[in-house]
Image (cartoon, coloured by chain):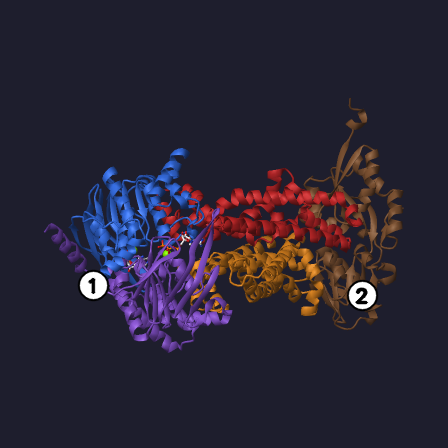
Chain colours: A red, B orange, C blue, D purple, E brown
Amino acid sequence: MPDIILKYQAEIWQSIGETFVMVGLSIAFALLVGLPVGTLLYLCRKGQLLENRSIYSGLNIFVNIVRSFPFLLLVVFLIPFTRFIVGTAIGTMAATVPLSIVAIAYYSRLVEQALLEIPRGIIESAVSMGASVLEIIFKFLFVEARSSLVLGLTTSTISFISYSTVMGIVGGGGVGDFAIRYGYQRFETELMIYIIVMMIIFVQAIQFTGTTIAKKLDKK
Amino acid sequence: MPDIILKYQAEIWQSIGETFVMVGLSIAFALLVGLPVGTLLYLCRKGQLLENRSIYSGLNIFVNIVRSFPFLLLVVFLIPFTRFIVGTAIGTMAATVPLSIVAIAYYSRLVEQALLEIPRGIIESAVSMGASVLEIIFKFLFVEARSSLVLGLTTSTISFISYSTVMGIVGGGGVGDFAIRYGYQRFETELMIYIIVMMIIFVQAIQFTGTTIAKKLDKK
Amino acid sequence: MISLQNISKSYQQHQSILQAVHSVSLNIDKGEIHGVIGASGAGKSTLLRLMNVLETPDQGTIVVNNQTLTTLPNRKLREARRSIGMIFQHFNLVSNKTVFDNVAVPLELTGYSKKAKVDRVNECLKFVGLEHKAEQYPAQLSGGQKQRVAIARALANRPAVLLCDEPTSALDPQTTAGILDVLKTVNQEFGVTIVIVSHEMDVVRSICDKVTVMDGGKILETVSIETEPYMIPDNDPKWFLEQLTEKERNSNA
Amino acid sequence: MISLQNISKSYQQHQSILQAVHSVSLNIDKGEIHGVIGASGAGKSTLLRLMNVLETPDQGTIVVNNQTLTTLPNRKLREARRSIGMIFQHFNLVSNKTVFDNVAVPLELTGYSKKAKVDRVNECLKFVGLEHKAEQYPAQLSGGQKQRVAIARALANRPAVLLCDEPTSALDPQTTAGILDVLKTVNQEFGVTIVIVSHEMDVVRSICDKVTVMDGGKILETVSIETEPYMIPDNDPKWFLEQLTEKERNSNA
Amino acid sequence: ESTPEEKKQVDLKVASLIPPMTDILEIAKPLMKEEGINLEIVVLGDNIQPNNALANKEVDANFFQHKPFMEQYNESNGTELVRVEPIYHAIFGAYSKKYKTMDELPEGATIAIPNDQINLARSLVMFADQGIIKLKDGVGLKATQADIVENVKNYKFKEVDLLMLARMMDDADLVTLYPSYAEPLGLKPSKDAVITENVNSTFAISLVARKDNAKSEAIQLLAEKMTGPEVKKFLEENFADTSLPAFD
Ligand SMILES: Nc1ncnc2c1ncn2[C@@H]1O[C@H](COP(=O)(O)OP(=O)(O)OP(=O)(O)O)[C@@H](O)[C@H]1O
Ligand SMILES: Nc1ncnc2c1ncn2[C@@H]1O[C@H](COP(=O)(O)OP(=O)(O)OP(=O)(O)O)[C@@H](O)[C@H]1O
Ligand SMILES: [Mg+2]
Ligand SMILES: [Mg+2]
């Protein structure tokens, strides 16, 4: 193990932990909120099962607003909200609030797109069986789009990691911020490269896992 | 027109111009390079037409590396390359280099995913007609996936705008950076809000255009 | 059982409007096996899809099982549809579910117990001769096998009405005979009303009580026919050979 | 013209291996119309897909038009395939191209001039009776219309060999008769070799010179038959009615 | 069982950005512990958030800015942050790879300067003080490029993030740098700078707190430790001519 890594061992472990918290919670919110929001976006579209102009426009605008904010300013704008939710606006937990909101907006768009690829015939067969909307979602849409949904979550997770590197501004920490602060700002180039290599391996592993699962799930 | 906007009119126009240059070039590279790279990723996959483990792994790793780098550090790492390409590492043109590389990586992944949704039968029919790989790409793959490709480019463009807001660090400018520097750092909150509203409208317009075109193109 | 009153359905096509079904009225009695025939594009599939309001008619009322589907609130319509089985011209199987799971879906929707579900699915797969393919995915099946899965799925929930869009179009004569047998059985034993779109005249003749002939979106006529048995071939591949050579001999003679 | 030597093809299924085609050898002469029949899942589609190496055989050689497709380099294989038309069981139309553009694809691949292309596409659409649907997209067509587009597409490039997987499965008898006429014409006038998988015995009898019967992945036998004309119905919807009532009368009698 | 000493444990949170600021706080940490004060260093990533956090009482003090910057923040946000103690001078300078003096710098040369308001102004003021450009009268630390009224040699000022400046030595003819950024490049203000600013106590990096807690025992104790001999020794040993103690 290179000296420089040993020297900063404790900080590195801590920053890995912080990244896990930030990205982990973002994924959780992407799934718990982004998946439903994306599904609603799809269902409320023109010509779809729950066609509803106002819900569609509302969600669509929410997603676009979140995605059009410069991320730094989104973080700043959300500070009052963050303080309301987690009691403070600095630190790792505080960083998860803007990250999760971006995660929701980001993943919901990919979910919408994945569902749009499902052939009409499948939905027709579901309707003809008298399936309720919830049943259509769980027994047809999510089954048929599952490999796209996994690929989308993979892409999203990698983006969340990338977003999390900016969270240093509110003291969120994480490996990306560590690389910037210790490696870049202190010109510890070697340390920075080790951290970046670590991140690349990590991202590569996520992509590999995602692709493999998606392939396993795809029976088309 | 609010006074504060009139006061900074010149700067705002300039920053809009800078955003257009950065995002425009990113889109151009996404299309010129990202589209082919994504298509290759798809074609070289296991079980596909040009199955080729080494090309696939190579491109896949390139895309993952770009996407796993903290964006700030990517900008820094690319400085020598940027300098080689545009002669300098500061300014709007210099900012387009890392942005375009991110654009390529980002869009190519979405292209790969869009092409994966094409039913096998379509490709089989192309093969049975004796179409060459290039003909399959242009006369079948891109035709059948065109609405997904447009939606993917829409999502990407919005991400590029978001990425471009960070390019102030190398003097790239742009509206996002303007909002950060004048609005956030100089506490001109009103100005910041105007700019953000402008960006939201802009993003909304892009999304609307993309969705409309995609819908027009989709005949499934 | 099924009653269509003055039903029309048109589609926007390029620059013109196509009247796929035009002021059609039709009554089908309970327990009847009703055939629909006509040229390609005559509007047969559209008519069938109107019967469970999969296509909303531009005008007219549709009554199935004493319920006016065209005015039924959503929840009620769903319930009504659970007792209307449908076999699609293009099968519409869920490609990420196994054969077993595809057939199980309608049972899950009506809340069958696990045990009852397994039994019923296996029973239906046996009807169509696909017990051994239960764990396969649709992409691994031949055309005829897919079609038979779609038939098993439509039968699974013991529907009161069965709408079949060319249910034997991908099947060889032997398998067709087997499927027709199954349809006749459910019709006779459980009183299932069956509407069957088909272009195979032998099939229509052998199973239908009444037949509606469509042309250009309109009903030309509905006639009652007496069914004549579908010549059921042995389950022996040599049958194909005999068919060919026997005829051969005939024509040589 | 087509010669298969000891061809095998197996698929991985769940936990077992399925031998879809098992050591098949078959010779089809130039200008022959060759039928392939057999039960659902017998391996007919697989055999057909092997003939233009759309499925790579596990073993054996395939020679078409004096070219050994199994060993041909990629470029040559592509060229060879341009003169082999194929009609798929599931049509495989490009859903984002109009009917016209779907049929035009093979012509663009061989570099027809714009004018020649338009003429030829219109000609082929006329063969299948779909001139008026040229600007429609596949999603706007009925099942039979889609199938006819697939037929027009396969004919467009004036192939030397035509591989047809149940080309009339979605067609009513009248349209079937029309299509069979077209196939016979290209066979007689241009010497096109045709392989036709079908489960409609009437179709096979009426058009094939030789017929191969498949069972469980193997060839049971190949027999020569004398074609007996397909009863060509009038292009009048009343024909359906006559069919029903006439038989009716017969059986009443 | 708890001893009276443990009962007195006080937590003190201080926001900061980069070394040597964070180093100084690290030195103070064990010293504060002895006094029963648990010093927690909160590292943030831009130069607005530490003041926001302080104003919102999420931290008790911060250590990253000079007085004018704090005053500007107070003015814009209606807050009452106060300087507790100046700690060290970071001498701003301009460096070049190619040129040794301002006279060598050709007409139209590119000068990279920070892009945040206060440091942008500070570098413009530095050039103005040396007579290289002229600024509008009385703009002081509000200066932007728009306030340049005279620029005889037609220099082009390029605004770049503070973090990025050190990497711009190859791209610009002249780069303005904080010593903490110049040092890793082996550049020392006294020896290598083309020009430096006048040492001016207004720009000393200072410990800042709020009006309501500035006088508190813990903050005062921290100020004391940060100006103690340990910090002085550290700065002299490690940042001899880049960060000069602003206390004796
Ligand atoms: N891609 C595949 N993966 C696994 N098994 C397959 C695949 N394609 C075909 N099979 C199996 O191979 C066997 C032969 O299939 P094939 O499609 O050739 O039958 P077929 O004679 O055309 O039948 P049908 O008349 O029903 O179309 C079937 O049992 C089928 O399940
Ligand atoms: N979604 C649609 N959009 C536009 N036109 C449609 C649509 N669906 C069907 N049509 C048109 O309506 C007409 C009737 O179609 P339908 O599918 O009912 O015919 P069919 O009698 O079932 O024919 P086939 O025997 O070929 O399946 C056809 O001309 C078809 O082109
Ligand atoms: Mg139909
Ligand atoms: Mg088949």
Quarter of the image where one finds residue E184: bottom right
Q: Position of residue A30 (x, y in %)?
A: 55, 45
Compared to residue C131, the image places residue D234 above or below, namely: below
Tag count = 2
Give neighbour class at mark 2: few <14, some 14-19, many 20+ (Cα, 10 Å).
many
- Classify residue D200 as left or right of residue B13: left
Badge 1: chain ID:
C
- For the residues labelled 2 and 1, say whether their Cβ atoms are less than 8 Å apart: no
- Residue tagged by mark 2? E96
What's under tag 1, amino acid-wise?
Ser
What's under tag 2, amino acid-wise?
Ser
- Residue tagged by mark 1? C251
Q: In this view of the protein, which residue sits in the foreground, E234 or B69?
A: B69
Question: Which residue lies at the image location 11% right of the left edge and 50% below the top edge?
Answer: D252
- Classify residue E49 as left or right of residue C109: right
Badge 2: chain ID:
E
Quarter of the image where one finds residue E231: top right
Q: Position of residue D202 (x, y in %)?
A: 25, 60
Q: Quadrant of ligand 3?
A: bottom left
* Number of the label disc, if any, that sits on residue B195: none
Quarter of the image where one finds residue C75: top left
Give neighbour class at mark 1: few <14, some 14-19, many 20+ (Cα, 10 Å).
few
Badge 2 marks a residue whose secondary structure is loop
The answer to whether the beta carbon of the residue marked 1 is less than 8 Å from any atom of ligand 1 is no
- Give the position of the N terminus of chain C as an image quadrant: top left
- Give the position of the C terminus of chain C as an image quadrant: bottom left
Q: In this view of the protein, which residue sits in the foreground, D125 or B146?
A: D125
- Classify residue C164 as left or right of residue B144: left
Badge 1 marks a residue whose secondary structure is helix
Report how far apart the C-alphas of labels 2 and 1 lie in the structure. Answer: 103 Å
Q: Position of residue A3 (x, y in %)?
A: 80, 49
Q: Position of residue B59 (x, y in %)?
A: 60, 60
